[in-house]
Amino acid sequence: MLRSGGLNTGSSDLLSARRRGSVRLAGAVAVAITGLAVLGRNSDPAGKPLPAAVTLGAAIALTGNANLYGQDQRVGLELAQRWFASTPHPRPVRLELEDGASDEPSAIAAFNLLIGRGVIALIGPTLSQQAFAADPIAQRQGVPVVAPSNTAQGIPQIGSFISRVSAQSSVIAPLSLDEALERDPQISRVAVFFAQDDAYSTAETAIFQKALAERGLTPVSVQRTQLADNDFQNPITAALQQKPQLVVISAQAVDGGNLIRQLRELGYRGQIVVGNGLNTPNIYPICQRWCDGVLIAQAYSPDLNTPINQTFRRLFQDANGNRTPGQITAQAWTAYQVLFEALQRLQKRGEMDGVTLGEARRRLMQEVLAGHYDTPLGPIHFRADGEVVQGRFYVAEVTMEANGRHGSFRLVRSFDVDSDAGGPTP
Amino acid sequence: MPDNGLLVQMILGALLGLSVYLPMAAGQLSLATPAFYAVGGTLAALMATHADHQGTISLGAVLWEMVVAGALTAALATLVGLPVLRLRGIYLAIATIALVEIVRVAILNLPFTGGATGIFGIPQPFHHPLGYITLSGGLLALCGWAFQRLETSRLGRAMAAIRDDELATRCMGINTTRVKLSAFVASAVLAGVTGVIAAHYLNTWNARQGSFDVAITTLAFVILGGSRSWLGPVIGGLLLTALPELLRPVGDLRLVLFGLVILLGPVFFPQGLITPALLEKLGRWKLRRLKP
């Protein structure tokens, strides 16, 4: 190995050759980057005429720590795609699924990729934090986005092309507290757990704590956890010392599932209310029989007796054994349905003929916001800013089978929400 | 074919790789890059969202953010570097991991950094990724020029000497503490300035951007690219950022393949892709062909 600063002629020759090599390689890299930048200027497909078969793009988390949700969403989207393709309709629609992973750069890359391929609208991304990164890109290029699972505050306000079918947690979360308090009106000691490095969980715990305060309950213990935590002995021991009668958890599926299990294992016997992060059947294998009895407020109930939900449930069960679908899957189906139906309405009125892709995207967004939809979630429509207005919410209880491997969300009660402004009424 | 958005991410990856490489060129294994990257990004997000920019921001304002981020990270790196650089090898690595964690938890809990959601709605200086390519590519070119000059400068030779043998270097009368600190501070400034560009490019900034994972990813840029020349981390950063996206046609297996590349890279290229021998060969290449 040559030491730097060698003074004899041989090594100085070697050094200058190395420097020359560096300059040449750097030049080649610079030329390559410039070339790629020139070639990669995406010839914006917005100016081209709309193709006969329009494509919906979905960028959801198939990898990373949000993949538990993404896999559910994939099932919902693929079922919806197959079902609506089999019904008679005037315009064929294709679905392109890309992995938006669980981080911001990947979501941006997936959005860019799909927009460049000329999709008419986008479904995704899975996490709200990703939406704050990727949605502005779709907004700038005028591509409609329907978010199937972003519940953070401020998502539809990113821009006029951004909407969602996932109701904000401020509407849903407190309903499960009411159920717990009705079951045991004596509850006065509440412990709160939340994943402090998760955007969704921190927002949701604020809603839970506000709802608790409105019901005259001050938490006796507030424990902060991390998404990547596996061992919750310390926060649980600290909370149990305060002898809580109700535990309220805002976390995601993996950490939340482990937390519930360890709470029970360490002797907690009271009621547990969890937030939307645990709203997936994927928690069953994690907390197993210890999931039993957990209360959760949902925007979807598999027991909803409408034709579209029966269809959705039947298709899901045909594809997945006898399991019942969860909220995330139903919302993904709904996102697809909303875009599909809006597209077909436009097509029937002849407004999709002879227009450019950019114009078709703009008209589709207007049509999405203008329509009313009968979905597995129940009837929904949109506010002018893209926020979903949903009529009915549910409280479910997790019921596990004796073997602890399979379970279901059993409907306990449903609440009708008067309008987008009004509060819930049971 | 990578689109321009991906190219921006590749260039940002190369810049972060260079930031990890700088202390390494002086023989120090520092993983502090994500901490300073997070400081730069958070600063840009705060400055850009607090002033009323109505969705767009002038390039001048972004450059000003870069200057402020550079100054802040330099000050922070000096403060941290003085005690931390007394450690060596794996101990220094652990101390810098702790720094990354402290900065992450601080950003998560400070009242003005938006908690876990972070800061969103960061205004854009450019309407097209090409603008970001020009800005970050210009910064990369500037760094390339500076690194090329550094190799023959007094400071660069002192860094290389410390890397070869710190004790011998000190015996030759070189103030090794100052040299190591200079490399650490320069690395911090580069990471901070890169964070400013990234915050605008990503539209949003939160504590997850500067996590331990980023430390490992950026270290992989240097290990795979090669740690004996500044071109190593540049090429490592460009390739490893692009690879997961270029592997998309493979479908669900793409991250498995990506992992294989990271695993097999050091097996087949133990010194990284860009070795001094390769550069020497490149430097002589034309001369040999011209000889009769």
Image (spheres, rainbow, N blue to C red):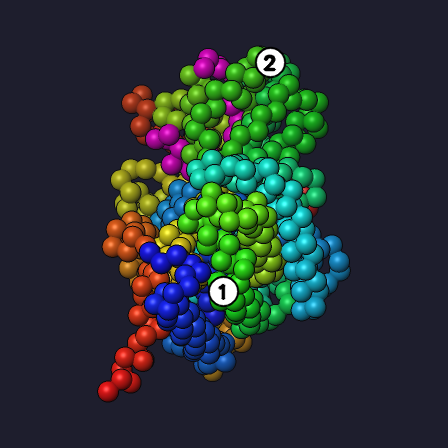
Q: Does residue B72 appear to the left or right of B291 in the view shown? A: right
Left or right: B23 in relation to A400: right
Q: Position of residue B219 (x, y in %)?
A: 43, 49
Q: Which mark is residue B152?
A: 1
Helix, strand or loop status at disc 1: loop
Q: Is residue A29 above or below residue A372?
A: below
Query: In what quadrant of the picture does the N terminus of chain A appear?
Result: bottom left
A340, above or below A234, in the image: below
* Residue A89 in the image, given as x and y percentages of width and height: 38, 67
Q: Quadrant of the C terminus of chain A?
A: top right
Is A401 on the left-hand or right-hand side of A133? left
Q: Quadrant of residue B48?
A: bottom right
**In the image shown, does A90 or B146 lie closer to the viewer?**
B146
Identify the element where label 2 is drawn. Answer: loop
Going by the numbered disc 1, the residue's amino acid type is Thr
What residue sits 24% from the left and 87% below the top? B292
Work out whether residue B17 can be spotted.
yes
Magenta span covers which residues? A266-286
Q: Nearer the viewer, mark 1 or mark 2?
A: 1
Is A292 above or below relative to B254? above
Residue B132 appears in the figure: no
Q: Residue at x 51, y 37 (%)?
A: B87
Residue A268: within the magenta? yes
Question: In the rendered image, which residue does mark 2 sit on?
Answer: A242
Q: Could you tell me which residue is drawn at 31 percent across and 80 percent down?
A: B287
